[in-house]
Image (spheres, helix red, strand yellow):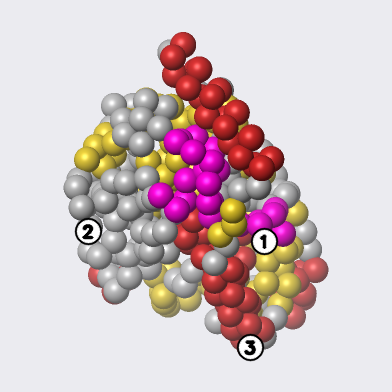
Amino acid sequence: MTDVKIIRVLDGGLFTTVQDSGRYGFQRYGVPVSGAMDRGALQAANALVGNDGSAAALEMTLLGPRLEFLASATIALAGADLGAVVGNVPTPAWESVTVPAGAILSFTGARDGIRGYLAVAGGFDVPVVLGSRSTYTRSRLGGLDGRQLKAGDLLRVLGVHPVADLVGAGFGGRAGAVRRVPPALRPEYGHRHVLRVVLGPQDDRFTSEGVATLLSSTYSVTPQSDRMGYRLQGPKIEHTAGPDIVSDGSPLGAVQVAGDGMPIVLMADRGTAGGYTKVATVVSLDVWRLAQAAAGDEVRFEAITVEAAHRAVREHEQWIGQVRGAAATSDGARARRAAAAVAAVASYLIRE
């Protein structure tokens, strides 16, 4: 495999970073897991281009970047619909697409969800730091120099090649076989989110009324939400004797409640330990869906058992299996649409 700088960043977008499935085994040293906020979407995008599910991809927030492809590449977009276009032609998501050399991929803005994922066949080649290529910007760790992308950056891809059996969904040589997620399997994010939780580990530090408030109220996502935690606003959750505890581990999805009684759901870049009570823990699959929630979205909590949480994980594994097995052949109409898209992009590139 050859390392080639094949993508030039013309504009980094609002907040675009390289992320994979996360950095494990170092929390005892205070190093967060990080990784993709919506790992289901990361896995799907990678599956669509034939990568391992944990390969490094771009995580794009609200306003995606503007990227120039210096060599042909097979890509897939998953997660939020950020309005992707190649040239002036809309680019399909949830399926493999071959982008020709010289093409520019850009985004018009979020339509559904706020975090999109761009995978490229072979995976993005940035240094492996503590077993991961993920970016943790607060410590400038991993990714591309530990920061978000900016204009002038050059991205290398491992094993640069358009994958022949994935060509055909949009821009490239011919209309042929394509991997895609069937519409029935594609998530819709919307603006109302129900999060399944397992109560604990410190639900005994809250009054019964406080727990009932958590499970019966509607909260809204605040603008202060980020990769570290989603801060919610709504009815106060009542403690029995204050919010402070001896610091303990901070799992993904922990619902931390500080002195103001407002819940904070801990996300990918959470600290490894904390000293506030945690009334519940959101199941991992719903944490990933919460990662697609925008400021002002509504959030409700629903208590389930550990066994039900395990079933949810198995259902997700089945979904990823369906995504990996999703290969279909273009029919005549798809072929004609693909050919028209190729012609439109070629015309755009000539004009440019």
Q: CA distance from mark 1 to mark 3?
A: 24 Å
First in sequence: mark 1 or mark 3?
Answer: 1
Q: Nearer the viewer, residue 184 or 136?
A: 184
The stretch in magenta equals 164-188
Residue 81 seen anywhere in this rendered image of the structure: yes
Q: Position of residue 293 (x, y in %)?
A: 63, 50
Dot 2 amino acid type: Val
- What predominant SS class does the magenta segment belong to? loop
First in sequence: mark 2 or mark 1?
Answer: 2
Kindly check if marks 1 and 3 are in contact, taking CB atoms under 8 A apart as contact. Answer: no
Which residue has dot 3 on it?
307
Q: Residue at x 64, y 35 (%)?
A: 336
Which residue has dot 2 on it?
129
Q: CA distance from mark 2 to mark 1?
A: 34 Å
Dot 3 amino acid type: Glu
Q: Residue at x 48, y 22 (%)?
A: 346
- Few, some or many residues within 10 Å of mark 2 (<14, 14–19, 20+): few
Q: Residue at x 54, y 67 (%)?
A: 325
Nearer to us: label 2 or label 1: 1
Q: Is residue 127 left or right of residue 166?
A: left
Dot 1 amino acid type: Leu
Q: Is residue 140 left or right of residue 182?
A: left
Q: Secondary structure at mark 2?
A: loop
Q: Is residue 82 left or right of residue 207?
A: left
Which residue has dot 1 on it?
185
In the rendered structure, does residue 220 fall within the stretch colored magenta? no
